[in-house]
């Protein structure tokens, strides 16, 4: 097995160690490249660059493999639920009965948002975008709980268990409050309920009528959140690590990750998928317009929910969620014309050479909205749901950064292409 990489620059040979991960991934250790050669690697978007060693999630994009701490997403989808998978992603092991009970209790005890913190909503317009509210309010956790957010890794790690459970639980509650705010409805306080049941209660209960989630509904929501728990060094998770690497606390780093997720090429895609499917439905179209526009190559007309920076095969989450759509709709006694449109669109794209040649397949966002809509969750809340699901992954990655004694602040380099040195020109002499 090759232990070193040889790079020849200006007739001089340089060797760099080769790193091998537990799944056989290979990397050239370039930490001394600039010092040894004066050169840097250029890799726009870091698609060929590893920023860290991590033990949380393994992806094999060519074979559509996704594992959390060694457990396949297929097994977790079949046997686990969101809180258990959140525990696994954060702590590295499936919880035993006592650990699961204690974690569930921490989530319950930290579900409420203090009245003073609730006042933040008074400053938001009724129709404020949910993700803009989510990042602001989550960031304010650092203001409301400064004792858990000292920006001192040693101190913050001593209180990590409480801060982590608080973050997961309160992001869920804040999500429900955002929905109520957008509807002009009073907030609903959390109850002593399982995680997803509590979320649905806080979303849909009314003063005159309690909302008690059917088991199928709670199970479907657990699946959706579990599917989003973590996904290696995606844009928002890399942001979490980048901000955390400066020593920033968990809550502040979460606000940054939420902002990164909000972009339409990342977590905003699930909303864009449903808007695309709805347009096809309303125009009684067969999707050809969107497929042809997507082949034009502009980022703004891409086929949303298709393609992935890592998967060059099916996103395993898309397969699982796609299969769950039929089951959930049937159990709820519902049908959704957008599901048939999505399936037809998928079939049409997968036969089109443009998508085949670029290995563009459905990703996690292509079908997730169908299930969320069936649960009564509005489209403008879909990215908030993604954030609730991804919170354990972000937190686990922050913990790896904070607990790495050899960690360094993230500071990528660049290739400067601006003006070379020139003298100052007094205003009077400028054209
Ligand atoms: C998520 O990283 C993660 O793990 C993210 C995520 C997670 O769990 O965190 O999986 C969640 O963000 C899923 C992706 C959600 N986004 C979308 O569905 C938006 C649509 N997809 C694309 O914008 C795109 O596929 C990306 C952003 C997801 C990936 O972009 P890449 O890897 O940078 O792809 P690229 O821009 O290099 O594209 C390669 C080619 C280009 O064509 P050519 O220049 O070679 O002619 O494929 C084309 C692109 O134009 N292309 C698409 C396309 N995606 C890529 N063309 C039409 N429709 C698309 N969806």
Image: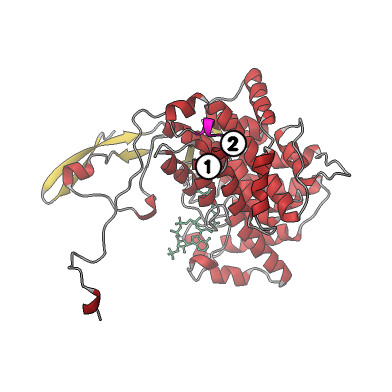
Secondary-structure class at tag 1: helix
Measure the alpha-carbon separation of dots 2 and 1: 9 Å
Question: How many residues crowd around disc 1 within 10 Å: few (fewer than 14), some, or many (20 or more)?
Answer: many
What residue do we see at 17% from left, 46% from top?
A: 37
Query: Which numbered disc covers residue 254?
Result: 1
Tell me, yes or no, if residue 411 can be seen here: yes
- x, y (%) of residue 289? 61, 72
- Mark 2 or 1 closer to N-term? 2
Horizontal placement of 188 versus 104: left or right?
A: right
Residue 228 seen anywhere in this rendered image of the structure: no
Q: Name the one closer to the observer, 299 or 109.
A: 109
Q: Are marks 2 and 1 in contact (CB under 8 Å)?
A: yes
Q: Quadrant of the C terminus?
A: bottom left
- Residue 354 or 21: which is nearer the viewer? 21
What is the residue that sits farthest to the right in this orientation? 208
Identify which residue is drawn at 42% across, 34% down. 401
């Amino acid at each position: 097995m090759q232990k070193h990489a040889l790079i020849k620059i200006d007739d001089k040979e340089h060797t760099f160690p080769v790193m091998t991960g537990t799944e056989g991934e290979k990397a050239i250790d370039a930490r001394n490249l600039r010092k040894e050669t004066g050169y840097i690697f250029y890799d726009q978007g870091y698609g060929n660059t590893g920023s860290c060693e991590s033990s949380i999630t393994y992806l094999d994009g060519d074979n559509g493999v996704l594992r959390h701490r060694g457990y396949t997403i297929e097994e977790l989808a079949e046997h686990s639920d969101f809180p258990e998978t959140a525990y696994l992603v954060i702590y590295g092991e499936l919880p035993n009965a006592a650990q699961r009970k204690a974690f569930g209790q921490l989530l319950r005890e930290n579900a409420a948002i203090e009245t003073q913190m609730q006042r933040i909503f008074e400053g938001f317009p009724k129709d404020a975008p949910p993700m803009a509210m989510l990042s602001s309010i989550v960031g304010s956790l650092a203001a409301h709980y400064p004792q858990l957010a000292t920006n001192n890794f040693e101190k913050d790690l001593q209180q990590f268990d409480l801060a982590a459970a608080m973050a997961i639980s309160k992001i869920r509650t804040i999500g429900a409050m955002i929905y109520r705010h957008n509807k002009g409805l009073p907030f609903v306080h959390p109850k002593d309920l399982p995680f997803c049941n509590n979320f649905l209660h806080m979303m849909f209960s009314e003063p005159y009528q309690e909302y008690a989630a059917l088991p199928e509904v709670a199970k479907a929501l657990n699946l959706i959140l579990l599917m989003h728990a973590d996904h290696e060094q995606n844009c928002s998770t890399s942001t979490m690590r980048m901000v955390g690497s400066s020593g920033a606390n968990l809550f502040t780093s979460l606000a940054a990750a939420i902002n990164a997720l909000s972009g339409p090429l990342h977590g905003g895609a699930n909303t864009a998928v449903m808007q695309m499917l709805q347009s096809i439905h309303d125009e009684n179209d067969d999707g050809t317009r969107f497929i042809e526009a997507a082949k034009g190559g502009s980022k703004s007309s891409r086929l949303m929910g298709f393609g992935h920076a890592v998967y060059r095969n099916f996103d395993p989450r898309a397969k699982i969620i796609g299969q769950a759509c039929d089951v959930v709709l049937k159990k709820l006694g519902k049908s959704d014309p957008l599901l048939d449109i999505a399936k037809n669109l998928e079939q049409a794209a997968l036969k089109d050479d443009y998508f085949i040649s670029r290995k563009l397949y459905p990703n996690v966002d292509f079908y997730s909205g169908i299930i969320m809509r069936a649960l009564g969750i509005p489209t403008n809340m879909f990215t908030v749901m993604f954030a609730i699901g991804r919170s354990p992954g972000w937190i686990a990655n922050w913990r790896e950064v904070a607990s790495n004694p050899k960690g360094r602040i993230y500071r990528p380099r660049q290739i400067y292409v601006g003006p070379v040195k020139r003298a100052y020109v007094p205003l009077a002499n400028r054209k």
